[in-house]
Image (spheres, rainbow, N blue to C red):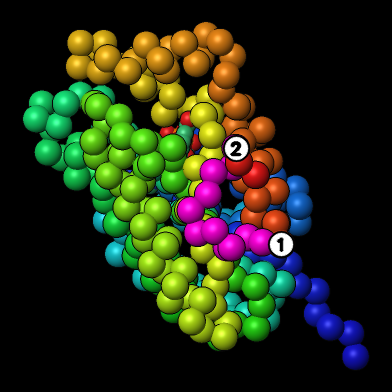
C-alpha cells in the first residue's frame, strides 16, 4: 500500500516582514507547509501551502489556543516533522528604562517573552507523542547575552528566552520523545528593527552610532541571507545539542 505523502510543518511568528517573512519564503521553497502568525499578512506571499493567522501576540493566549486546536485537529499524519519558530520580537523605543513608556515596555516583554512561552507550551502539549521529529526554535539575540543601555526590556526578553530554552531543554531531554530546543541568535539583519535602532534619538540612546556604523559599513545580513543561515541551523544533525547558540558560531 502506498504511504500518503507527508511534508515538514513549520509554524513561525512574525512572518509578515523581516527575518520571519524570509524564513517563511524559504521554507515554502523547500516544500514545507507554513503557518505564519503576525498581525498583518506578508505582502505578495501566496502558496497553497501557506496559511496566515492574524494574531496579536501582545496577548498570546488566543493565538496559543488557536495553535493547540489546529494541531489537535490535524494530528501527526500529514507531517514528516513539526517545528515552531518563535521569531516575532519588538524593541521598545530606545531610551533609559526610567524614561520609558509603561505600555511600550510591557509590549516588548509580552511579544518577546510571554508569547513564546505560551506558544511553546501549546505546541509541545499538542504534539506530545507524535512519532516524528519536533523542534522548537526561539529567535534570540546577542543582546540576550551582552547587555546594552537604552534597551533594557529587549535585553531582558532575550535573556529570558535563552534561560527558557535551557530549562525547557532539560524537561524535553528527560522524555523519550522529547522535542529539541534552541534559542538562537540570528546575527545582525537589515530589517525594520535595525532602522528603528539607528533612527533613535542619540541623546536617549548613545549606542545608536554603533548601529548606524554597522549599516554604513555594510555589515548587516539581508533577511534572505539570515534566513538561509537559520534554515541550515534547523537542519543540523546536532540541533538541540546546545540550547543556547549563535548562528555566527555555526
Ligand atoms: N534585525 C536584527 O538585526 C536582529 C538581530 C538579532 C535578533 N533579531 C531578532 O530576530 C527576530 C526578527 O526580527 P526582525 O528584525 O525581522 O523584526 P521586524 O522586521 O521588526 O519584524 C517583526 C515581526 O514581528 C511581528 N510582530 C511584532 N509585534 C507583533 C504583535 N504584537 N503581534 C504579532 N506579531 C507581531 C511583526 O508583524 P506585524 O507587525 O505584522 O504584526 C513582524 O512580522 C526578532 O525576534 C528579533 O529580536 C533581529
Percent across and percent down for residue 178 are: 54, 78
Front residue of this view, candidates 198 and 247: 247
108 vs 12: above or below: above
**Residue occupying the point 37% across, 53% down:** 161
User: Which quadrant of the rendered structure holds the N terminus?
Assistant: bottom right
Percent across and percent down for residue 117 are: 35, 62
Q: Which quarter holds ligand 1?
A: top left
**Residue occupying the point 25% across, 27% down:** 149
- Tag 1: Cα neighbours inside 10 Å, few (<14), some, or many (≥20)? few
Percent across and percent down for residue 6 are: 75, 72
Q: Tell me where the magenta segment starts and ends, as one range.
A: 238-248
Percent across and percent down for residue 159 are: 34, 48
**Residue occupying the point 43% across, 61% down:** 165
Residue picked out by circle 1: 237
Residue picked out by circle 2: 248
Which numbered tag is attached to residue 41? none
Front residue of this view, candidates 179 and 146: 146
Indicate the quadrant where residue 68 lies: bottom left
Amino acid at each position: 500500500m502506498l504511504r500518503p505523502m507527508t511534508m515538514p510543518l513549520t509554524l513561525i511568528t512574525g512572518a509578515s516582514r523581516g527575518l520571519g517573512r524570509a524564513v517563511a519564503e524559504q521554507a515554502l521553497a523547500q516544500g514545507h507547509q507554513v503557518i505564519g502568525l503576525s498581525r498583518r499578512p506578508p505582502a505578495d506571499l501566496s502558496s497553497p501551502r501557506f496559511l496566515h493567522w492574524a494574531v496579536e501576540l501582545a496577548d498570546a493566549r488566543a493565538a496559543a489556543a488557536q495553535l493547540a486546536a489546529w494541531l489537535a485537529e490535524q494530528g501527526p499524519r500529514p507531517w514528516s516533522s513539526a517545528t515552531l519558530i518563535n521569531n516575532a520580537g519588538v524593541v521598545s523605543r530606545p531610551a533609559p528604562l526610567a524614561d520609558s513608556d509603561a505600555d511600550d515596555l510591557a509590549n516588548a516583554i509580552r511579544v518577546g517573552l510571554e508569547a513564546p512561552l505560551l506558544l511553546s507550551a501549546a505546541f509541545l502539549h499538542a504534539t506530545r507523542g507524535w512519532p516524528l521529529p519536533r523542534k522548537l526554535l526561539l529567535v534570540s539575540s546577542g543582546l540576550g547575552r551582552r547587555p546594552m543601555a537604552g534597551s533594557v526590556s529587549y535585553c531582558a526578553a532575550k535573556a529570558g528566552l535563552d534561560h527558557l530554552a535551557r530549562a525547557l531543554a532539560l524537561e524535553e531531554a528527560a522524555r523519550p520523545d522529547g522535542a529539541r530546543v534552541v534559542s538562537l541568535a540570528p546575527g545582525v539583519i537589515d530589517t525594520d528593527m535595525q532602522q528603528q535602532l539607528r533612527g533613535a534619538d542619540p541623546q536617549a540612546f548613545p549606542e545608536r552610532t554603533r548601529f548606524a556604523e554597522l549599516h554604513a559599513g555594510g555589515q548587516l545580513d539581508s533577511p534572505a541571507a539570515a534566513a538561509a543561515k537559520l534554515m541550515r541551523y534547523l537542519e543540523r544533525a546536532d540541533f538541540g545539542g546546545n540550547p543556547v547558540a549563535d548562528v555566527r558560531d555555526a
